[in-house]
Amino acid sequence: MNLKDLFKPFTAWKNLLAEPVPIKKPLERQGAPRYRGFHKNDLEKCIGCGTCEEICQNAAIDMVPVEGEETEEGDSGLRPRIDYGRCCWCALCVDICTTGSLTMSNQFQWIDSDPDVFRFVPGADEKYWDDEELGYKKPDNYELNNLDRIEMEEMEPEKRNHTFLEIVKGFSKEQAIQEADRCVECGICIATCPAHMGIPSYIKAIRKGDVEEGLRIMYETNPLPEVCGRVCTHKCETVCAMQHRGEPISIRWLKRYIADQVSLDKYQEIMGTDNLEKREEKVAIIGAGPAGLSASYYLAMMGYNVKIFEALEKPGGMTRYGIPEYRLPYEELDKDVEYIKSLGVEFQFNTKVGEDITLEEIHKDFDAVFAGTGLHLGRSTKIPGAEHEKCYQAVDLLREFTQGKEIEVAERIVVIGGGNVAMDISRTLARLQNKQYGQVQLVTTSLESEDIMPADEEEIIESREEGITLKPGWGPKEIKVEDGKVKGLKVIKCLSVFDNEGRFNPKFDQSENDFFAGDMVIEAIGQGMDISYMEDVELTERHKVKVDENYQSSKPWLFVGGDIVKGPDAISAIADGHKAAQGIDNYLSSKGEK
Amino acid sequence: MKDLIQKLKKRFDVNDVVYQKDNQTYLTIAKDQAVSFITHLKDVEGFTHLVILTAVDWIEDNEFQLTYMLNNPGKKVDLGVRVLIDREEAEMESIHHLWKTAATYQRELREMFGIDFPGSPRVNEDFILEGWDDIPPYRRDFDTKEYSEQTYYPRPGRKTHDPAEYMKKKLYPEE
C-alpha cells in the first residue's frame, strides 16, 4: 500500500459541508419516458393468444378468464395475469405481443405489505397508470414476429389463362419451414376450423421436418388433406393471431405441403392402418363427396364394412365435378380417395339412389346409412329468357366439362353470380374462350357490390388477371332474346342485397340500368338439393333435413350431413362426416348391446 | 476512420469492417493477432479507454464472439474489435495488463459464458452467481425458463389455461 491509497478516503471530507442533494420525495420520482414499469394491456385489442406467457423466461404470466371478456372465434377470452414476484421487466412479452395490446407504463414504485397485490391482470384490475401515455412500447424498428408471409409462387396470368394446369406451385421444404416458423402456436385457429384440425401441431411437425407426424395429425380430423390443402375456405386464417399486425400464416398451403411430401404407398405404414380390426356391421354411404368420404374413412378406421353409392362415375362430389382442375388437379383428389379405398371402403359408381336403387333397399342390406348427397341442382333467376336453351346452369356445365363432354363456349358470355361457383365457371369458360377464339369476352355480374361478394378475394383478383370483366352490384332483369337468339343480359342497379335483419331481400333502382352483350348466359346464383330419395324424413323450417348433434335424422338408422345440412363448403362437410361416423358408431354399438 | 482502417490493414489481418456510425466502427481480427492488435490501438492509435468487453454466443457456428469496445477520447471515436473463438475450448488471452478493469469483465465472462482467461486476476472466483452449479447462464443452450421453473417455487394459487383447450371447453365441449 502506498501513501496515496492511505489518504484517498479523506478526499471525501471535502463534501462534508456541501449542500446535500437528497431526492426529497422519492416516491414522486418519475421513471424515464421509455422506462419498463408495470404492464398495461388493451383488453379490447388482446385476443388471449398466450404468446406473452409462452415467451416469459421467468414463468411469470398465467392466462386467466376475465369477467366481461367472452370466448369467441378469434379470442380465447383469457387475459395475461402477471406475477411481479417473478417478472424481471425484460419486456419480451411486450415485444412478442401478436396484437400489440400489451405495453408497459413507466411506473415502478409501489409499496404494499400484502405480496398478493403484486399479481394482477393488467387492464382488468384497474391501476392508476392504465391511461398514462409514458412507458415502454415495442419499438417500431425491430420485430420478433415475422409479419410477412413467405410468398407462394403462382403461374403468371398470361401462361395460365388458356390451360387447366394447377396455378399454385406449392412450398419448397425451405419455404414451408420458414412459413411454419411464423406460427406462434397459440391455437386460436382450432375453434374456427369446422373440423377443429390440430393446426399448430401439424405446423410444428413441419418445423421439425417431420411430415409423417404432420400427416398423422391431419388425418385425426381430416381425411382429405390434398383437397383441403388446395381449396379449403381457410376460415382458420381469418382468425390467425398474426393477422392483427401482419399477414396470417398460410395454413392451407402448409397443409398441402405435408400431404404433397408423402407418397401414397407409404400412407398405411405411417398411419399404422395396414391391419385394421374388422367389425360385423355394415354401413352404406350415399354420395362420394367430402362428407361421404370423411364418414367412410372414420367408419373404416373403426372397423366397419363401408360401401359408398355414388351417382356419378367418379368420386369426389363437388370437389371433382364443381371445382376446376387448375385449383384442384384430379390426381390429388384421387390420392386422398385411393387411401380411403385402401382401407377396404367399397365404391359403387353410376348408382343414383332413388333411381337405380331405393334407400329402403339399401337399408335392408346395411345396419346404418349416411347420406351426404350435396347440392347439385342449379338455381334459376327465373327472369324472362332464363328458359332459353342458351341459358345454362353453372353446376351443370362444370360437371359436364369434368366428364369430358363437349360444352358450349360462345364468343361472348355473361355469367350471373358472385360466389366461388360463378368464379369457377367464369374462369373455366375464359380458358376455353382463349383456346377457341384467342381472347376472353366474358362479363360476370353479381347483385353484391365487390366488398360483399361472397367469392374468395383471390378468386376475384385472379379472375380479373385472366381477362374476365367483373360487374358487381347489378340485378339481372331479363335475358334479351331476338329472333330466337340470346343477345345479352339486361340489368338494373342493385342498391342493397340484405335487409336490416340480414335477410336476403335485394333492393333495386329501376331507373339505372345497363346491358351486357352475350351469346350465352350462365346462372351461378346458388344450388339446391335433391333429397326426394328420402321419404318421410323430418325437415327443419328451412326445408333441410332435421338432424341432431350426431347427424342422426328422424329415422334412427339414417344419418345425414354435408352441404344438404350445413355449409356449403368442403371442410364443414368433412367435419359432418366425422361426427356422423362417431354418431353411427354410438348408434350401432348401443344397438349391439341390447 | 477509413484512413485508420487502411493503415491497420497493412499491419494486421483486419476483416469484416462495418462503419456503423460516423464515430463507431466494428472489425474482426484473428484470435492470435488480437492482443497485439489491441495493444497497438492503445499505445499507438490513441484508443486508451476500454469501454466494455462482452461476448455473443453464436451457437449455430459453434463460436463465441468477443467484442472489445475501445474509445479514442482525443478523436471521440469508438472501435469495436471482434474476435471469434472456439466455443468448445472457450479460452482467450487476457488483457488485464493493458487495463486493470479488464480483469472484472473477464471474470464476468468466465462466469456468464464459461470463457476462460488464464492468468487474469481472480478469474475463477464467483462474481455475482454465488454457488452456481449449472452451465453458464448466458450460453444459449441454457434453458432460462426451465431453470426458473425448477428453482423458484410457484406461488400458491397460480393457475393458467391453454387458449386452445379453453376455447374447446367453452365453444365445442361435446366433441
Image: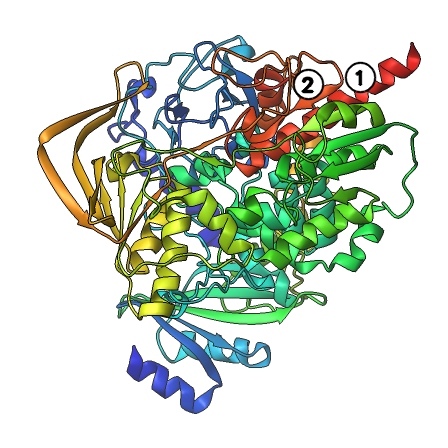
Residue A310, x across and y down, in percent? 68, 40
Q: Residue at x 31, y 69 (%)?
A: A437
**Residue at numbered disc 1:** A587
**Contact? badges 1 and 2 (CB < 8 Å):** yes
Secondary structure beneath dot 2 equals: loop
Q: Residue at x 26, y 38 (%)?
A: A385
Can residue A490 be seen at all in this image of the molecule? yes
Q: Nearer the viewer, residue A445 or B142?
A: A445
Residue A473, x across and y down, in percent? 21, 37
Image quadrant holding the N terminus of chain A, namely bottom right
Q: How many marks?
A: 2
- The reply, left or right, for residue A544 in relation to residue A133 is right
As displayed, is residue B112 above or below residue A436?
A: above
Amino acid type of the residue tagged 2 in the rendering: Asn
Amino acid type of the residue tagged 1 in the rendering: Tyr
**Residue at numbered disc 2:** A550
Q: Residue at x 76, y 34 (%)?
A: A298
Q: Residues within 10 Å of mark 2 (few under 14, many from 20)?
A: many
Image quadrant holding the C terminus of chain A, namely top right
Can residue A53 be seen at all in this image of the molecule? no
Secondary structure beneath dot 1 equals: helix
Q: Residues within 10 Å of mark 1 (few under 14, many from 20)?
A: some
- Give the CA separation, mark 1 to mark 2: 10 Å
Q: Earlier in the sequence, mark 1 or mark 2?
A: 2
Residue A549, x across and y down, in percent? 64, 16
> Residue B10 sits in which quadrant?
bottom left
The chain holding disc 1 is A
As displayed, is residue B131 above or below residue A465?
A: above
The chain holding disc 2 is A
Q: Residue at x 47, y 9 (%)?
A: A67
Residue A152's tag is: none
Q: Nearer the viewer, residue A371 or B71?
A: A371
